Structure formats: structure tokens, C-alpha cells
Image (tube, coloured by chain):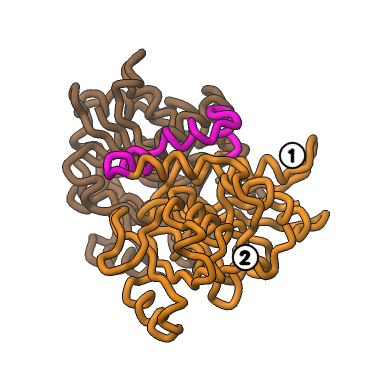
Chain colours: A brown, B orange
């Protein structure tokens, strides 16, 4: 088994991900928000990189069925219906809708994972389901990549911790020495020694959490640590994220 | 005190480094090789990004006084006098010479650090000297950055460990809670729990070490772990690295 963690999309080559299962992680907040949206009945989430790309995609969809969502600098993009908070993705708001979404780090990371087979959207809120699904697609001699969104092209502690948690759960017990880990996977696993299985502690220690709390998003920082709240695994394929292929 | 670690130059903005002391680390092998070159009598090392830039710089210097050095894929650049091995930088070879050097990750990282004041070249081989010099320039309320070269735009375990060692040595005893650490600094410090003060263990666990050993550079992998072999601190300023400003 090979297990590679990438702390940020910058520098990741298509060949690093092509043909293997990829888990994309952006705990604060994009993948947590996408999990909430689909668990609460959204038909699909379409990840866009730029704001104007999101608007263009939305214009090509039926007006009543689409919602624009996303943030820049943490705040809802001006004119968009939704920001990037898991709590906004209620059944009343997103049920039956397509959510076109653009965030600073998360949606570009998902797009960068395009070559993965499959590309799974991971968070603490769907941790066990994502682990189970990944195991099912990985096989004995599997080759797994975990792609962290990071922050503004830098290292994000909460994503690295999440990568470590996924890695730990997916390495068969007692088999670590037989798994080819890349350097980032070694460092990600090490973070578990600091924070144990405490999502809250790891998230609270991150710069992103501090910044979001300062901007009034404390609720989000709590919501993203609700481990296994949802039993869904969003899958990104053909430019949209859905539960269609999900059997979790 | 603020202490920021950057695991790779990609994504680092000029503002992240401008005006503050920066330690650049590329243990395998550029900063280790530069320390050896200057400790063994080279007049200066001039870091170039591209191969043809190195050749152009060399052509503008007096022919007898200049040596081209560098690697691509770990191997000496075709036609260059030297590769990127600390062991090549003997007094007989580099004494009195200007070494124009281009490596895959190290010399671009040094160039990316340009805005730092000062920019110090750090390695295990000049660890104590670099710590002492950094302390001298940092001051009480200092703001320090440690820039890892990383590998091919990705995370490098040996550089992250080195960053953790520098961070640990520079945080006043008992004062960690009063130091503003960025996310990468927290993760770098965590690696010390795994490898302790054993440079050899941390370096041996890295992908770069395995690749270099496979290419026949085992001696280099050993040489870069010789802690405090040299009592010099190379400083990068005005496009060249020298010991001129060094008082260590």
C-alpha cells in the first residue's frame, strides 16, 4: 500500500493523483459545507474556482434550481445567496437545488483532484463513512492520495490533522511498516500524537479557526468538528459533486 | 515573538519575509553544501535559479576565479565543474573561488527569501552558529521566518524537522505560549517528538535521503547530519552568499 499526503494543491502534478482514490479535505470549511449540503438534500454541488466562473455556470442552469455559494476572505461573496457555512446548508434552503460554489482554497483543491478515481469529499462530519468508502475502493495493494486544501497556498494545521486521521484509519493495524508513506504523511500522522482523536483541539489550534472566530463564524468552527454527523460520501466526477455513486 | 515556518517557497509572499530575519534550510543538500563551500574558503556562492542563468552569471566573472556547481534530478549538471555534494567543497577545490550554483529546490528558495533582513543559510552542519546569529539579530519582540526549500514544490521531512529544531532552539525556554506560531511551526515542532535531537534519524526517514542513496550519494546523506561541524553563518545579500557580515 502507498499513502501520500499533499498539504496543499500547489506543486501537485496530475500524475500524483491520476487513477487512484483521492480524499480532498478542507475542514474549514469547504468540504464540511459540501458534506452538509448534500446530506441535507442538495442535488449537486458544482465547484468553481473563480467567482465569475461560478456565475457563468449558474447562468447555464435553470434559475429556480440553482444557488450560488462561496466566500472570499471568509465572507460571503457579494450577491451570492449563500456563504461557506455548514449551518446555512439546511434542507429548507438547499433541498433539491444545485449549489454552485467558489471558495478560496477548497473548490480549487477539488478541481485540482480531478484525475483521481474516485475523488471523495472528506471531513470530520463524514469521517467514518469516508473511511469505509475509501477502504472499499482501495484494495489490498492500493495507492491512496489525501489532498489538503491548505490556506492561501500554505500549510493548514486542521487539514493536516484530518489527513493524519484518515491515514491512521486506513493503514491496516500493525501494517504501518509495510505502507509506503510520503514525507507529508509521516508528518500528518505525527500530529495525532499531539491532538489524539480530539477534532476540536486540533481545529482550535489552527490559524483558520482563530480567524473565523474573529469574523463571527464560531458556529462553523464548532460544526466542522461534529465527527460522523453525516453518513454520506460526496463524490466529485464530471465537474459536479453528488451522492449518486455513494453506497455508504 | 512571532515565528513562522514555510514548508516550501510556493505560496510565500514577499510580505511574509520582508524586513525580518529569515533562515533558509535545504538540508539535502543545497544549504549544507553552501555552508561547506564557504567554511572551506570559497569567496562567495552565487545562487542561480535556472542552469542558463548560472552560466550567464559565470561568464560575467573572471574565468579563473569561478566554478559552476549544481544538480538536476540529483546529478551534476552536464558540463558543470561540481555537483551539489558537501564533500566536493574542499579547500583545494573552492578556496578563493566564486561558486555559481543552481539546484532544483535550494537555490530557488534562497532567491525567494530575498526580502529577509538578514537571510541566513542554515543547516545541521552550522546549527549552533545559525541559532546564535539569529538570536543576535532577532531581539526581544522579534519576528522570525524559517523557509524550507522542500522538494519539487512539495513537503520535505528533513527540512521540516530542521525548521522544528531551529524553532525549538530559538523559542526562549518556558515561553512557547507567548510565541505566535503559525500552523507549520506547530507541525515542525511536533516532528522533534518523533526524532528527538537525532538529525540522522530524521534525515534517514526522508524520501530525499532514500532517493540520494539510490543514486550513490550516501556520503552526502551522512555529511549533512554532522551537527555543528562548521562555525560559520553564510548570509545572502546583494545576490551573493558570503561570510562577510558574519560574526559567528
Between residue B24 and residue B31, name the one nearer to us: B31
Element on which disc 1 rests: helix
Q: For this rendering, which residue is in front, A111 or A144? A: A144
Against A88, residue B38 (above or below) is: below
Q: What chain letter is assigned to the residue under label 1? A: B
In the orientation shown, which residue stands out farthest toward the right?
B140
- Is B1 one of the magenta-colored residues? no
Q: Residues within 10 Å of mark 2 (few under 14, many from 20)?
A: many
Q: Residue visible at 74% across and 39% down?
A: B176
Element type at mark 2: strand
Find residue A15 and report its horizontal and vertical position in percent.
Answer: 21, 50
> Which chain does tag 2 point to?
B
- Is residue A120 placed above or below B239 in the rendered structure? above
Q: Residues within 10 Å of mark 1 (few under 14, many from 20)?
A: few
Residue at left offset 35%, top offset 52%: A109
Viewer-nearest of discs 1 and 2 = 2
- Looking at this rendering, what residue extends furthest in the front direction? B92
In this rendering, position of residue B160 left or right of residue B83: right
Give the main secondary structure, helix, strand or loop, of the magenta stretch.
helix
Q: Which residues are magenta?
A: B188-216
Q: Which residue is mark 2?
A: B235
In which quarter of the view is residue B242 placed?
bottom right
In the picture, measured across the screen, residue A194 lies left or right of residue B212, that is right
Image mark for residue B176: 1
Kindly indicate the quadrant of the structure image that contains residue A220.
Answer: top right
Answer whether residue B195 is visible to the viewer in this image. Answer: yes
**Place of residue B111 in the rendered image (x, y in percent of width and height, measured from the top left):** 50, 69
User: Who's the residue at 46% across and 57% down the image?
Assistant: B89
Earlier in the chain: of badge 1 and badge 2, it is: 1
Amino acid at each position: 500500500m502507498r499513502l501520500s499526503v499533499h498539504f496543499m494543491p500547489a506543486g501537485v502534478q496530475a500524475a500524483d493523483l491520476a487513477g487512484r482514490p483521492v480524499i480532498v479535505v478542507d475542514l474549514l470549511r469547504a468540504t464540511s459545507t459540501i458534506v452538509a449540503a448534500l446530506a441535507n438534500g442538495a442535488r449537486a454541488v458544482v465547484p468553481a474556482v473563480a467567482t465569475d466562473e461560478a456565475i457563468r455556470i449558474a447562468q447555464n442552469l435553470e434559475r429556480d434550481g440553482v444557488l450560488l455559494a462561496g466566500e472570499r476572505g471568509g465572507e460571503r461573496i457579494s450577491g451570492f445567496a449563500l456563504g461557506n457555512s455548514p449551518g446555512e446548508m439546511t434542507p429548507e434552503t438547499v433541498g433539491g437545488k444545485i449549489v454552485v460554489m467558489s471558495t478560496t482554497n477548497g473548490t480549487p483543491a477539488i478541481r485540482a483532484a480531478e484525475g483521481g478515481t474516485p475523488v471523495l469529499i472528506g471531513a470530520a462530519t463524514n469521517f467514518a463513512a469516508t473511511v469505509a468508502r475509501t477502504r472499499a475502493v482501495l484494495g489490498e495493494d492500493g495507492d491512496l492520495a489525501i489532498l489538503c486544501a491548505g490556506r492561501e497556498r500554505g500549510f493548514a494545521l486542521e487539514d493536516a490533522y484530518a489527513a493524519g486521521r484518515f491515514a491512521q484509519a486506513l493503514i491496516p493495524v500493525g501494517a504501518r511498516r509495510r505502507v509506503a508513506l510520503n514525507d507529508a504523511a509521516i508528518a500528518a500522522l505525527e500530529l495525532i500524537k499531539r491532538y489524539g482523536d480530539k477534532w476540536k483541539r486540533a481545529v482550535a489550534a489552527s490559524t483558520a479557526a482563530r480567524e473565523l472566530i474573529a469574523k463571527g463564524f464560531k458556529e462553523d468552527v464548532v460544526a466542522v468538528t461534529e465527527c460522523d454527523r453525516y453518513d454520506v460520501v460526496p463524490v466529485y466526477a464530471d465537474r459536479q459533486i453528488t451522492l449518486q455513486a455513494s453506497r455508504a
